């Protein structure tokens, strides 16, 4: 089995299919314009499929398509068809902001996609505008309910909670999810990239999120899926809704981190907080064989020693504290969250 320097196998692959996004979420892409990756630098569907098959051969069981906004990638359903035909892949998922989901849900379903994560941080139209800057909440909700009627299961709502921005949305989001049979996952605001001006006091810790929910609803802890998923899950009593919290800041889970990331321009990144990635596309386009690509990825994984969130946690509670701005990282849009 392929393992890194901390004995962690490679099990999950997040593939960013585009760095473009139609939203400008304050916690992710706050600026109006970015220097976008040139089109010819973006991996083709053939290249993504080839690399995905290599990763699966090396032990990857679950693939998640992300971005930027993955539904902006033309004909994404064709990529889904290619990936869903990989025999030993156990799970294929898509993370989307939902704005184009109403249009594409049916073709994504027919292509073999079974489950969706949808980002939704508020049910309030005004707050929504403030957070994402562009786009409309109604379109996202339309996409969400279209996905439900197409039979995607489970549909998980992801909400990043930022103090003073949407911390009053926790209970409405839980109630909404229970009412409509969605799962709900809260994510601690993280210092991904360099643009979001992260400060620890803007982050609402897992304990606080759960305490608030506990005052209104009862739930039972289920733990982490496969024992190593980023979210700790809970079952909301008397409902089909699973509640999850991803506490990357206050309860880091690096010791169980089996995730690799492939950027839209073909770089392998072994940690969400990496400064650089390894350019797989360059080797691929120079004519490397499948075996050579496999060996390359193997060697990168064997050397992996990332544990950024654990180190951040240690620094946060140390005398000197932690300053996000001292750490240069790849932006979330090119990395794929
Ligand atoms: N555009 C798609 C979407 O928003 O779902 C996919 C890409 S987005 C980068 C993937 C996930 O990263 C989303 O659930 C988003 O909420 C999350 N995310 C982005 N910036 C974050 C931050 N600073 N802290 C925590 N989660 C973040
Ligand atoms: Fe776009 Fe998703 Fe980032 Fe929001 S979180 S700016 S929707 S990539
Ligand atoms: Fe994995 Fe890096 Fe996140 Fe730790 S900080 S859980 S190593 S992605």
Image (cartoon, rainbow, N blue to C red):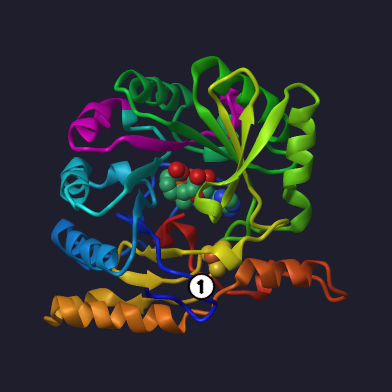
* Residue 14 counted in the magenta span: no
Callout 1: 10 Å neighbours few (<14), some, many (20+)?
some
Horizontal and vertical percent for residue 282? 23, 79
In magenta segment, residue 120: yes
Q: Is residue 193 visible?
A: no
Tell me: residue 118, above or below residue 51: above
Could you tell me which residue is drawn at 48 percent across and 68 percent down?
330
Q: Position of residue 298 (x, y in %)?
A: 33, 79
- Of 21 and 52, which appears nearest the observer? 52
- Decide if residue 267 is in sight here: yes
The quadrant holding residue 254 is bottom right
* Quadrant of the rendering where the N terminus is positioned: bottom left
Task: Tell me what residue is drawn at x 41 percent, y 65 percent.
Answer: 260
In percent of width and height, residue 115 lies at: 36, 36
- The quarter of the picture where residue 118 lies is top left
Q: Quadrant of ligand 3?
A: bottom right
- Kindly state the secondary structure of the residue where label 1 is placed: loop
Q: Position of residue 266 (x, y in %)?
A: 29, 69
Disc 1: which residue: 274
Q: Is residue 132 left or right of residue 220?
A: left
Report the magenta residues as a range: 102-127
Residue 75, placed above or below residue 148 = below
Q: Is residue 150 found left or right of 177 in the rendered image?
A: left
The one nearer the camera, 243 or 147, is 243
**Residue depicted at x 60% and y 26%:** 126
Farthest residue in the front direction? 1
């Amino acid at each position: 089995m392929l393992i890194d320097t901390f004995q962690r196998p490679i099990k999950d692959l997040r593939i960013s299919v585009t760095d473009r996004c139609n939203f400008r979420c304050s916690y992710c892409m706050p600026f109006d314009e970015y220097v976008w990756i040139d089109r010819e630098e973006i991996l083709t569907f053939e290249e993504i499929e080839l690399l995905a098959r290599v990763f699966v051969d090396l032990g990857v069981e679950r693939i998640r398509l992300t971005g930027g906004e993955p539904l902006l990638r033309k004909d994404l359903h064709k990529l889904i068809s290619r990936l869903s035909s990989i025999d030993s892949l156990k799970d294929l998922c898509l993370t989307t902001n939902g704005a184009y989901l109403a249009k594409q849900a049916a073709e994504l379903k027919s292509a073999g996609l079974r489950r969706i994560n949808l980002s939704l941080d508020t049910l309030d139209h005004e707050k929504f505008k403030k957070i994402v800057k562009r786009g409309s909440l109604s379109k996202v909700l339309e996409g969400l309910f279209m996905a439900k009627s197409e039979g995607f299961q489970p549909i998980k709502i992801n909400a990043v909670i930022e103090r003073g921005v949407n911390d009053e949305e926790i209970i409405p989001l839980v109630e909404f999810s229970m009412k409509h049979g969605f799962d709900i996952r809260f994510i601690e605001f993280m210092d991904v990239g360099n643009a979001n001006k992260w400060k620890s006091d803007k982050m609402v810790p897992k304990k606080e999120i759960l305490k608030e929910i506990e005052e209104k609803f009862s739930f039972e802890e289920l733990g982490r899926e496969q024992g190593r998923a980023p979210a700790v899950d809970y079952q909301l009593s008397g409902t089909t809704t699973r509640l999850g919290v991803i506490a990357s800041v206050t309860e880091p889970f690096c010791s169980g981190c089996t995730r690799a990331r492939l950027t839209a321009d073909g770089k392998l990144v072994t940690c969400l907080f990496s400064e650089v990635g390894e350019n797989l596309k360059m080797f691929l386009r120079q004519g490397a064989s499948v075996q050579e690509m496999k060996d390359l990825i193997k060697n990168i994984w064997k050397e992996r020693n990332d544990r950024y969130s654990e180190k951040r946690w240690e620094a946060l509670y140390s005398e000197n504290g932690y300053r996000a701005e001292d750490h240069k990282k790849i932006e979330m849009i090119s990395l794929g969250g």
